[in-house]
Amino acid sequence: MEKKKVIIIGAGPAGLTAAANLLNHGHEAVLLERTVFPRVVVGESLLPSSMEHYELLGFMEPLKAANFAVKPGVRFIKYGRNYDFSFSEQFTDGWHYTWQVPRADFDQIMADVVTEKGGDIRFGATVTAIQTEPQVKVVYEQNGQLTEVTGDFLIDSSGFGCVVPQLLGHEVLKGQYPNWAVFTHVKDEFRHNFPEPERISFDILETDLWFWMIPFSNGNTSLGFAGNKRHFENIEGDATEYFREKLKQSERFYDRFKDCEILFQPHWYKGYSQSSSVMYGKNWVLCGNCAEFLDPVFSSGVALATSSSMKATETLLKQFAGEEADWEEYKAYMEQGIGVFRSYVDHWYDGKLQDIFFGGVLNTTFKEQICSVLAGYVWDHNNPFVRRPEKGILSLHKVVELSQLT
């Protein structure tokens, strides 16, 4: 029977980050990935907080060499007005930029680095059964063959698949947001006819509906709509034609993209907000989206994925060294970061955060503190908008309301 030290389900950023950290410390890892690379997935807008992970684990140089589009900040648009955040003007002493990436290329680069470190990535491997006690045992199907592998520990980074919770019978909870998303890539051949053509932008169409525009350095651009499912009707027909028609809702970007070639059939994500009722157990832990996924609006997915995998493997390395491994601390750490982002997502969709951005009340200090959250620094407890995000947002919104009375 085949034996590996650690078995990782999923070879996205969470799984690859976990594998790299373990391999750097001399522990072998096998990754079981259901899909075959290259693949197209959402999560193309990164956050600066992940850059230190890429640098620490050895991903940075090959990622730099790929010449991805630089993301120095983010632009929100509402009623034809812009509101910009620059990562160089933030409260936390962190990275001032990140990238906008086609995930097919980004994930492949990370996978190549892990393979070079000695990682064993098995593509097209669908996990069908697991056992976590007294030892880890995983059965997977690949090319019509069932294979069994055992290990000392299991990391589930399977994303929306939530493999371990599903197979162990733990509840996967649907989030509070009844939101859908649809996205595709286009050949952005007219981009240079428009100002700041590579500036990532979020166009607010209604309080609970927004459009993303993420330009890549390869000349293509990711376009998508996300929001309450009530905004997505009559979707049974041709998805490409549906998407072209929906583009008309973005007055800012319709002229730029109305005649662009759509590069693949738009992908749907329905009811994407979810979480697992349990984050860890005997000999296993959840990382990334399968622990919880909130919403794409602040690009938190990959940032939380890499942060969760770093924290989980740091805890696991202590366990392997015979030291005390506090998995409750891991859970609390993740709940802290997710909780900060949740406050911002909640108040994005109830309109309060949008009112703050466009209400003219953000002085330099407040803006820098909020910018640090948008950069992914949701564990910086020196930042009052991290320590008490709910209070900070509601207090600022009260200022907006008072300013409208005068």
Image (cartoon, grey):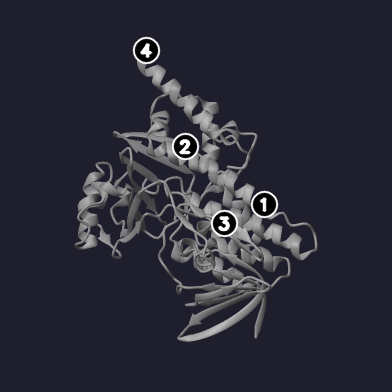
Q: Residue at x 61, y 38 (%)?
A: 92
Left or right: residue 82 versus residue 63 is left
- Circle 2 sits in a helix, a strand or a loop, which is it? strand
**Sequence order check, earlier mark of 4 and 2:** 2
Instruction: Give the Cα distance between marks 1 and 3.
Output: 11 Å
Q: How many marks can you see? A: 4
Q: Which mark is residue 278?
A: 3
List the residue tagged with mark 1: 328
Image quadrant in which the C terminus is located: top left
Residue 35: x, y in percent?
45, 73
Q: Residue at x 47, y 77 (%)?
A: 124
Left or right: residue 76 versus residue 248 is right
Instruction: Give the Cα distance between marks 1 and 4.
Output: 49 Å
Q: Examine the rendered structure and indicate whether residue 374 appears above or below residue 81.
A: below
Q: Which mark is residue 85?
A: 2
- Circle 3 sits in a helix, a strand or a loop, which is it? loop
